[in-house]
Amino acid sequence: MSVKPAPASAPFAGPFALATLSAPSRPKFPALVTADELVVDLRAALNDETLTVRQLLEQWTALLPQLRSLSEDDTAERRALSEFRVHAPLEPRQVFQSGANYRQHVIDLHVAHRADGDDRPEDERRAEAAEIMDRRAQEDLPYVFIGLPSAITGPYDDVVLPAWAEKPDWELELAAVIGRPAHRVSVDEALEHVAGYTIANDLTDRATVFRRDMPQIGTDWLRSKNAPGFTPLGPWIVPAESISDPGDLRLVLKLNGEAMQDESTKDMIFNVARMVSYASQSARLLPGDLVLTGSPAGNGVHWGRLLRDGDVMDGSITGLGAQRTRCVAEVTS
């Protein structure tokens, strides 16, 4: 099921964005959406009935000028966005996720996840976490792990909270969308490989992040982050040329109308270029891949309020639009 999109005065920055849409009882199709919320079916416009957004990104450099022209072409057939269902904007092959990349967020988590027997005052533990973050920045050591594409769902779809998830939490994030293969690229080159940006909410079950049976193994990202629907994505991919500075965007997540996360990407320890470059040193990034850049302070574990059946999350990022998802408890037999 889907919930009604959050209202917005402007859906995104720039003249157009990419989306994956469908009409009732019809298959999904790649779309160009204009700033006035009109839709151009890119299969017809580009004369390719099997085209997907990911395939479009594989030809990003060549097709971008055509997309600019289409957004300005009043003769192209256009329909109202309200006629269509909005899905996740693409199906990536790979999802790279950044952990511990917002300074204040990590300090809050460090305090919340106090080790057994650690009775030190909170201000002492905050100071310790701040020192760790400053050292990471000086040593230039981002933290990246792998997510599953099967966790992705649409920006207005219901999110099923698994019965086993004891502490489901939200994590609003800026996601970079790769438009050119990237392998061992420098920081200076990295943004040349980013086609655009979108919104991700990287849900996490805090109760299963750490393996209690074998603590020496460390984190269990499969269990804690990759349930079906745990990554609401979109609604749009906004071309990078329309976002003047990804290092100065405001992220806001509201839970049932109350702001819980409200922070700027300025608080990131490692910027988008550094995260893309770092991931590319080990892996080959492919067109359509996502690089999630971490979540700011204000998660549920900080507030002592985790997700419950019926909760509605509204997430927005400057210039990228907004998503609205409702939490639904898993029904077990």
Image: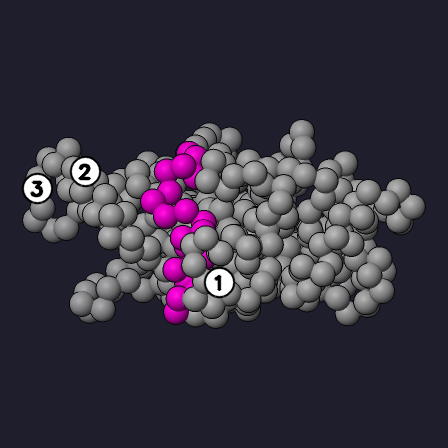
Mark 1 or mark 3, which is nearer the start of the sequence?
A: 1
Amino acid type at image mark 3: Asp
Amino acid type at image mark 2: Arg
Q: Are marks 1 and 2 in contact (CB under 8 Å)?
A: no
Q: Position of residue 105 (x, y in %)?
A: 32, 41
Query: Mark 3 — residue?
Result: 119
Mark 2 or mark 3, which is nearer the start of the sequence?
A: 3
Q: Position of residue 128 (x, y in %)?
A: 15, 42
Residue at figure coordinates x 26%, y 60% from the top left:
210
| The one of 54 and 324 positioned closer to us in this rendering | 54
Q: Position of residue 330 (x, y in %)?
A: 48, 57
| The one of 59 and 295 positioned closer to us in this rendering | 59
**Neighbours of disc 1 within 10 Å: few (<14), some (14-19), many (20+):** many
Q: Which span is picked out in magenta?
A: 263-282
Residue 199 in the figure: left or right of residue 18: left
**Neighbours of disc 2 within 10 Å: few (<14), some (14-19), many (20+):** some
Residue 310 in the figure: left or right of residue 296: right
Query: Mark 2 — residue?
Result: 126
3 vs 2, front mark: 2
Residue at figure coordinates x 37%, y 38% from the top left:
267
Is residue 252 something that shows in the picture?
Answer: no
Residue at figure coordinates x 25%, y 41% from the top left:
107
Q: Secondary structure at mark 1?
A: strand
Amino acid type at image mark 1: Val
Query: Mark 1 — residue?
Result: 95
Q: Is residue 272 magenta?
A: yes
Q: Position of residue 74 (x, y in %)?
A: 88, 42
Residue 54 in the figure: left or right of residue 152: right
Is residue 215 something that shows in the picture?
Answer: yes
